[in-house]
Image: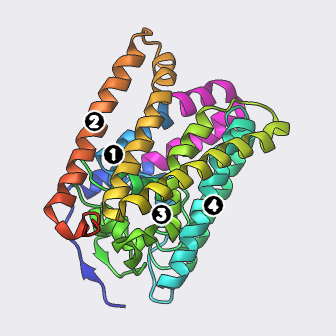
Amino acid sequence: MTAVPLPVVRQRPLWRAAQWIGVSLTLVLLGALVTAPTTTLHVLWDMVIPLLPAVFLVNPLIWRNVCPLATLNDLLPDRPARRAMDTTMLRRAWVVGIVLLFAMVPARRFLFNEGGIALALTITVVAVLAVVTGVAFSRRAGFCGSLCPVLPVEKLYGQAPLISMSGARCSDCTLCISIGCIDLAGNKTVAQTIGPLRRDTGWLRTSFGVLAAAFPGFILGYFTTSNGDLSTAGEVYWRVLSLAAASYGIVAVLTVMLSLRAALAMPLLGAGSLGIYYWYAAPVLAEAYLAPPATTSIVRGAMGVVIAWWLFAALRRVRANPSLAPRVANST
């Protein structure tokens, strides 16, 4: 397989060091989840994870360049015998990743938010999956570019990165996935992921379109449920998925009424999802970092400004390309 050289990343050795630090911290995390679960879960869920969507907003490659699972996925050198992932297989894998996302996030409420051992076992299983798929498929095709449940969120929030940067993992490209590589395609990733249906309201029928349209309700559903034991699983899933379905229905009606193409709908949905997320995450962050109560309003306001800046950049790109704008029916 012919490899195409990519631009040289001068800081690659620093990124490489950061990648292995990330793996080391993951091992520490696994141990801490077993030996000191209460403190570890508080730090992870209340102090670290709420910052990740903001990182994706700046540029998802910041996280992808250091993600420990990505390091494990790319653990062994690539070999020609490994399979690339064709478009059909890739789209099916993306569906699996979205299903995993919709299954794992609500499970925080009844399993992962307060269950250190359960979370440690789940992280271990996913890490093994990353290694195994890295052996079976070329480069990052088997996990990072396909099955990873975080990938759809990276794509949705990474449509218009506030800063530009290059991926630090691949020095050349072998097209290990045929389309939609977020490390290579940049702000074209969402368009490639949706495919030709992005040109009209058909994007609603694609897997990524379903995710984007349902995501505001999905986030609202999660934050309006409470932690409980395993017996509350059905109630949690019912509320989260019901609000996700309602969100999809509302977006579908508006999309058909206004003839919204994906290029306009995706930034609006990304910004709306982020706004809902940080409205609820702001008090969690303020409390976790022992900040005064007024900090909640400050965080909400600051994130509102950043999200508006991000949305403006995304919509400016739409305005600069008339073919991306919504269709307007001729009036006679």
Q: How far apart are marks 4 and 1 (CA)?
A: 23 Å
Q: Residue 84 carries which label?
A: none
Q: Residue furthest right?
A: 231
Residue in the picture at 46% in, 84% down: 79
Q: How far apart are marks 4 and 2 (CA)?
A: 29 Å
Q: Residue 306 carries which label?
A: 2
Q: Distance between the residues labelled 3 and 4?
A: 14 Å
Q: Quadrant of the N terminus?
A: bottom left
Dot 1 and dot 2 residues touching (CB under 8 Å):
yes
Q: Which residue lies furthest to the left in this view?
A: 320
Depth check, front residue: 15 or 185: 185
Q: How many labels does the image show?
A: 4
Q: Does the magenta stretch include residue 77?
A: no
Q: Which amino acid does label 1 sit on?
A: Leu
Residue annotated with mark 3:
209
Q: In terms of sequence position, does the residue under pointer 4 or pointer 1 come before the other?
A: 1
Mark 3 vs mark 4: in front: 3
Q: In terms of sequence position, does the residue under pointer 2 or pointer 3 come before the other?
A: 3
